Each structure stands twice: as structure tokens, then as C-alpha cells.
Image: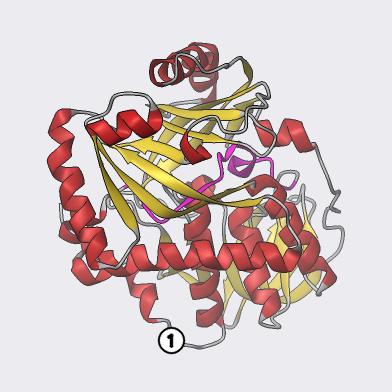
Amino acid sequence: MDLQSGYPYSLIRNGLPYNYPWLERDIRTHVAVIGGGISGALTAHALTNAGIPCVVADARTIGLGSTAASSSLLQYEIDTPLSVLRDKVGTYHANRAYELSVAAIHELEQICKALHFPHFERKHSLYLASYLKDIKKLSEELEARRELGLKMEWWDAAKVKAKMGFDAPAAIYSHTAAQTDAYMLTHALHQHNIKHGAQVFDRTAVVDIDFRPRSVVLKTSLGYQVTARYLVIATGYEVLQYIKTPLLKLNSTYAIASEPNHAEEQWYQDCLIWETKSPYLYMRTTSDHRIMVGGRDEPFYNPGRRDKLIHQKAKALEKDLRRKFPELRFHTEFKWTGTFGATEDGLPFIGPFAPMPHTFFALGFGGNGITFSQMAANIITDLIQGKKNPDATIFSFNRKIHF
């Protein structure tokens, strides 16, 4: 599947920092990971740190799928508000999903520190009520989060105006958020993993999977085999080639990045900005003083239709920014689009899928994909080691969703 198009900011800025070989021999390992983007890289990192041999295979050049198009926001908030998620999956599972999202941000920070990876920044996050009618549900969301002890502030319209300079009915200002560079973090993880025994192959397409009583055999397009005790599928939105059951709706999202603007701050504390309407608009700054704006999602039908809308959507996103910050210097330099999936409850799918033995899925669907990927890495590593992970049921394929 063609997952992104245009000129993703991180890809243009960083190019192809490392080369990886393609697989040219038969190989054996304990765990094979299909997918070398951020989900596969984090899973391989957890496996490697646990002393479990693994091989990563990606059909593309590493990082050139959805990972390259990621806006790399790290938030504990998922696409479904906590107050709504409780009705969908139950209070305990909803609360725990949010707690795990908070923990994932902390864990990702520690991983970046251990890797000496420079592209991780702690941020605050502003969640705006898009309309007057959203104040009530935003207030309910505030109370639900306070029950979890999350550090936040309630901003009324006057405070939003005073702090941000634009009008909005209300907002939640969260103190726990961050941003990174998913594309470069993926490469940093792979480089670390390789140094500690993992093997990473790109341009290595898996064309057939043979499930045997105690192993899985992957056949590549060049005719070589990877034999493993366990398989992890971390192909993101391309998973539909393995699972025919409807799991998600595919959407196309759009993003732009400005030329550098060397102001000390673009807005209040350069916080992450997003809102209650669906699809939501989001904004963030970058370490080299650019502004990134994303949103304007459309249902995904085919790459051609998606790509034709890039210029139109870029102009609309720039107008969205100017409505909030008319005085801000902003000239679009990069614009791109990517395909992503959304589940009915906003949660990822992590763990085993009954029709495929010895196999685990790490599918961080939704707007919080990187933190979901970190959760998946923890859960799957536990399961492969034979440990019980009580959180696995929250994200299982068998979970109950109430509509």
C-alpha cells in the first residue's frame, strides 16, 4: 500500500541516515518482526533488551511508510476522550489505557536518553473546545482525568484569549505531553538493536507465511526463508493483507511545515494544540523553529485521490493557522499526506490473533500511534517470555466494545 506522499518534513530534513541490507540467505531466529517502522523498531528494542534474538524485515526502505509522515506528537490523550471511552470499554480498561499512555511517554523519554537521541522534548498540551456546545463534554473530560490524578488546568474563554491570543470557548491545559521525530527515532532504535544482536533487513518483502507446529516460516520475494519460533506483525495500516476482519477505517491526513521562524516562542510555551471537533486540527513547533499544522482528514479510497488533494488541503491548513494566529509569520515550505487507521474505540490492537498461531500483532492505530507502539512492545515482549501481562486484554482482538 502507498502510505504517504509529498514532502514529509522529517524525511526531507534528515534524508536516508542509514543503509540496511536486504535478506540474501536463509536465516533462523527466535522472533521475526515484519515491519521496520516505529512499531517494529520499538518492539525489536524491547525484545533485544530482554535478550531475545530477533530479525526485522521491511518491504520498503526503513522508515518510508507511515513513520516518515508522522507528526510525532506524544500525548496520553487518545482519539476517544476518557469520559467517552469508559462507556465503550468499561471504566477500568479506559482508565488503565490512559494510565498506560502516560507511562509510555515517560518510557519513551528514558529510551531516548539511553540512546542519546536528541529529538525528544517535553511539552504541555492544549485541548480546545471547538464550539460552545463542547464545553460540557470538555468539563466532563476534565473531571474524568482528575480522578486519575493527571496534572491539568481548566482554561475558560478569557484565559484562552489571555494566554493564546485567540478565541475559544474553553480548554484543558495538560502538563504531560512531548514530541519527538518518529522517523529518526526509528533509525536510532534499529542502530542500537543491531549493535546488541538484532538483524534488520529492508527491501525484503514477505510473500508467504507457513505456520508450523512450533515455528513460523516466512518466505521472501527473493525466495529466502526466515524461520522463527514467534512472529510479530507490525505493519501498521497494511495489516489488512493478513487480517480480513474489519478492524479499522482508513483515512488520509494532511500536514504542512513552515519555513523557520526564529522567534523565541511561536505561542504560549510552544504547547501542542488540538481540539474537540472531528477531524481535529493540531499544531506543534519543531526544534528548528518551524510550525507544523495537520488535520483536514478525508476517508481513504486510493492514493491518487488522496494525493490530488495535497495542495488544496495545504492551503486550508494554512488558513486554519492564520485564523488563530493572524500575526504569526508563516510560509509553507513542506506539505504531505499520509494514510492512517482509526478503530471504533480509539484503542490499538495488540497481542495474539487466534487464526494465526505463534503470532502477535503490534498495531498502534489512531492518533496516538507512537505511545501505543511502546505499549505493544512491552506487552508482546512479556507474552513471548511466557509472562502474564494483565493489560493485554484491554487491547486484545476479543475485547468487547459497546456502541
How many numbered marks have been drawn onto this rendered protein structure? 1
Residue 9, image x, y percentages: 66, 31
Residue 80, image x, y percentages: 29, 49
Q: Determine the secondary structure under disc 1.
A: loop
Check disc 1 and give the amino acid type: Lys
In the image, is residue 256 part of the stretch drawn in magenta?
Answer: no
Residue 7 found in image quarter: top right
Residue 339 left/right relative to 33: left
Q: Is residue 88 visible?
A: yes
- Segment colored magenta: 62-79
Majority secondary structure of the magenta segment?
A: loop
Q: Which residue is pictured at 32% across the width and 70% down the height?
A: 96
In the image, is residue 72 part of the stretch drawn in magenta?
Answer: yes
Residue 172, image x, y percentages: 30, 45
Residue 25 found in image quarter: bottom right
Name the residue that disc number 1 marks. 388
Residue 350, image x, y percentages: 44, 65
Q: Observer-nearest residue: 375 or 328?
A: 328
User: In the picture, which quadrant includes the N terminus?
Assistant: top right
Where is 296 relative to 227, above or below?
A: above
Residue 220 found in image quarter: bottom right
Where is 194 relative to 285, above or below?
A: below
Q: Is residue 397 visible?
A: no
Q: Observer-nearest residue: 278 or 362?
A: 278
Q: Which residue is pictured at 86% across the width and 54% down the height?
A: 21
Q: Residues within 10 Å of mark 1 (few under 14, many from 20)?
A: few
Q: Observer-nearest residue: 134 or 158?
A: 158
Q: Which residue is pictured at 55% across the width and 39% down the height?
A: 71
Q: Which residue is pictured at 63% across the width and 57% down the height?
A: 208
Residue 130 left/right relative to 187: left
Colouring mode (rainbow / by chain / secondary structure / one colour):
secondary structure
Where is 385 relative to 287, above or below?
A: below
